[in-house]
Amino acid sequence: MKKFDTELKTLKSKGIRPSYIRVRILNYLLEERIHPTVDEIYEKLGKEILTLSKTTVYNTLKLLVEKGLAKAINIEGNELRYEAERGFHGHFKCQECDSIYDIAVSEITFMDNVEGYLINDEQVLITGLCPKCNMSK
């Protein structure tokens, strides 16, 4: 597990017992910035971890989100996608190829001073055509 030293330390620092599956899921989120669904994570990692179950993926992602190491994002409908926590940013979804990209945006402050509201999350989603798809039109 030498390759995953950073992920091991990160999990331990948050009080998470670093099993190989947890380390591998966190590593996947950090390296593959594709905003995967549970199914996509299961399909990709299940090829190398034969004992992996969807329940384990769900439970690991839930734990990573609770501990602030990952974020669940709702791009469209009921489809949750996941990413490693990287600070505040927005997302751009291409309506042609369905790719999701991180985009730099300023933090939203319009609700900061509204009395009685407690904001737990702010998300920015922009849709349109990515440069690649726009060039092919």
Image: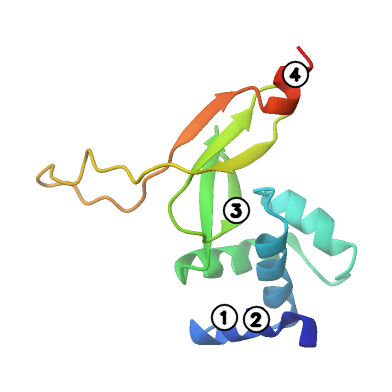
Would you place residue 46 above or below residue 93 in this image? Answer: below
- How many residues crowd mark 1 within 10 Å: few (<14), some (14–19), many (20+)? some
Q: Are the two marked residues, 2 and 4, in contact with CB atoms closer than 8 angstroms?
A: no
What kind of colouring is applied to the model shown? rainbow
The dot on residue 135 is 4
Amino acid residing under circle 4: Met
Q: Nearer the viewer, mark 4 or mark 1?
A: 4
Residue 1 in view here = no
The dot on residue 82 is 3
User: Tag 4, which secondary structure?
Assistant: helix
Residue of label 1: 10
Give the spatial CA distance, label 3 vs label 1: 17 Å
Q: Residue at x 27, y 50 (%)?
A: 119
Would you place residue 33 above or below residue 74 in this image? Answer: below
85 sits to left or right of 105: right
Relative image position of residue 84 (x, y in whole percent): 58, 61
- How many residues crowd mark 3 within 10 Å: few (<14), some (14–19), many (20+)? many
Residue of label 2: 6
